[in-house]
Amino acid sequence: HKMKVKKYFVKALHRLQKGPGYSYKELLVWYCDNTNTHGPKRIIREGPKKKAIWFFLTLLFATLVVWQWGILIKTYLAYGVTASLSIGFKKMDFPAVTVCNASPFKYSQVKHLLQDLDELLDAALDRILQPPPANTVRTPPASSNKTLNMTLWNQIPLVMIDESDPAHPVVTDIFNSSSPSISEAGRNSSSSARSNATSENDSCMYRNFTSAAQAVTEWYILQSTSILARVPLPERIRMGYRAEDMILACLYGAEPCNYRNFTQIYHPDHGNCYIFNWGMDKNTLISSNPGAEFGLKLILDISQKDYIPYLTSTAGARIMLHEQKSFPFLKDQGIYAMSGTETSIGVLVDELERLGYPYSDCTANGSDVPVKNLYEEYNTSYSMQACLHSCFQAQMVKKCQCGHFLFPIPDGVRNCNTEDYPDWGKRRQRRDTLCLDPAVDTQYKMTISMADWPSECGISYVCTGWAHANILVSCRNGIIKLNIYFQEYNYRTISESATNTIVWLLSSVGGQFGFWMGGSVLCLIEFGEIIIDFLWISILHLICWCKVTKQKPVQAPHRARPPTVSQQVEAHTNLGFQEDDPGNEGLPPKQAVPIPGTPPPKYDSLHGPPLHDLELDSAEESE
């Protein structure tokens, strides 16, 4: 096998010798004379002056072509996209509608759990809203006659900051009657209230608030979340609003419906939520006509008189429209419907289609995202919010060894609370680059309008229609009417397409090459051919050099000094000249060199082919 390979390469080199030439110069001249590219031919055919001009122009335009090619390739590798909008008409799936109460729990059901916290907050508000005059001793408020449970306060206290002297702000604990102290943490702060969470290594986490009301609200939410996190999930569901109490009336198109047509889920922010047309157990409802008469109509009772005083400052219903089999992230994408109003929501459907890698970072189903989706227990599809919340929960479990109350808890992990995990309140959610946008997404654009409902003249018969006594008392402040429908019977598709394709790149590259050099694809092939010939000649010269170096006889060192020019001339004219070498005295005499005879005539017929050619021919004949 080695002999066959060697013969093949020897034949290839032999054929190459019969090609354009044996040297680089001959190869270059042959290429310029035979190429179809304009410019190189004029370099070898014109006179000296025109040859220089054509050489300069050819070099200039070749540089411009390479520069333009670099710009085109860089533009293509940027992978830009163009968004196109198209409008289609078809029967559309009615969106899933999630409704929740703004208050996650009934105050009558959780009052015994929040009693100590409420009393503590009442006393703190008395201290904050009624500060003592200057140079007076702070006296306990009337609400502080009863003994307060200071356990929660010692875990996460509130402090007041006096910035009358900006250079030396004074930080004072609200329930500390001793003299105020100066805190280094508050020297550069302009806030009037501050909350801090102590950790096991006595480190503090300060949060600034410019409003005392905002500080108290955030402090109450943090404390109540810690308390309710220790309550089992079935008990939390029982303390929320039931579907039969919240959903008073339902009508989809001309078909009546009730609370049994809704799917219940527990949402950490809003407690019990109810989803219409979720598509988990039943087929998706189809809407064939636009308009309010063909949509969903609901009447809800929010019972805001049973709201938790300090936890919920907003009265109304939280609503979200989303795709079937997707989890409703109401805190991120929901809207509020105000009590005592009729809210009409006109819906427009936008379908987003994103290109995948390398044009954009998106995923088809989330399988290529290295984050475990904690919302899989709801059998829902992938979404950006689900990935962000799952990623945050994973970081929470990793750093705090507990799970956040607002997100699904992994198996074997406990809910975070201030008593067992003092540092858990320091963690804040942030967008992680591991999460990707979905490749296909459906968004619902809403047009919202509201009006008072029921009116002054119609409140008597509207509210009397329900036999519940509590509704008769708080009709205008406790009920909401919703109308959800398709505003137009069409959908818009916003799809991404590649701005620069490979076809655009090839046409642009060819256009630039043809405009500046008058070349084509065949010219590029010719240039590639000359590069291959250049490499083969280089290999041939390298092999020849190796052979010459290997076969060159080893010469003995010259023991005598080299002859002078006059001696060389004398030896050429006088055949009997013998050089006197004084350095050879005492050495044996050299043998006489035979005198050469008359040289043979220089006939061309006496020259034979090169030795290696004869070897190749003999090798071919032997085959």
Image (cartoon, helix red, strand yellow):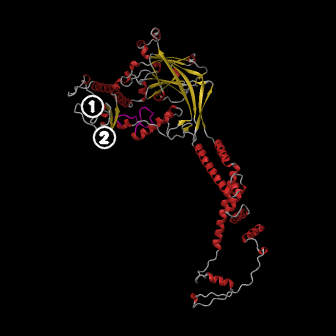
At mark 2, the secondary structure is loop
Could you say where residue 550 lies in the image, as x and y percent from the top left? 63, 72
- In this rendering, the answer to whether 613 lies above or below 117 is below
Q: Nearer the viewer, residue 530 or 277?
A: 530
**Which marked residue is nearer to the observer: mark 2 or mark 1?**
1
Q: Nearer the viewer, residue 240 or 526?
A: 526
**Residue that mark 1 sits on:** 164
Could you say where residue 549 lies in the image, as x and y percent from the top left? 63, 72
Could you say where residue 46 lies in the image, as x and y percent from the top left? 70, 56
For residue 368, say whether it is visible: yes
For residue 355, say whether it is visible: no
Residue 40 as seen in the image, left or right of residue 444: right
Quarter placement of the N terminus: bottom right
Q: Tell me the distance, in whole angstroms, between the alpha carbons under discs 2 and 1.
A: 29 Å
Q: Is residue 339 magenta?
A: no
Mark 2 belongs to which amino acid? Asp
In the image, which residues are magenta? 401-421
Mark 1 belongs to which amino acid? Ser
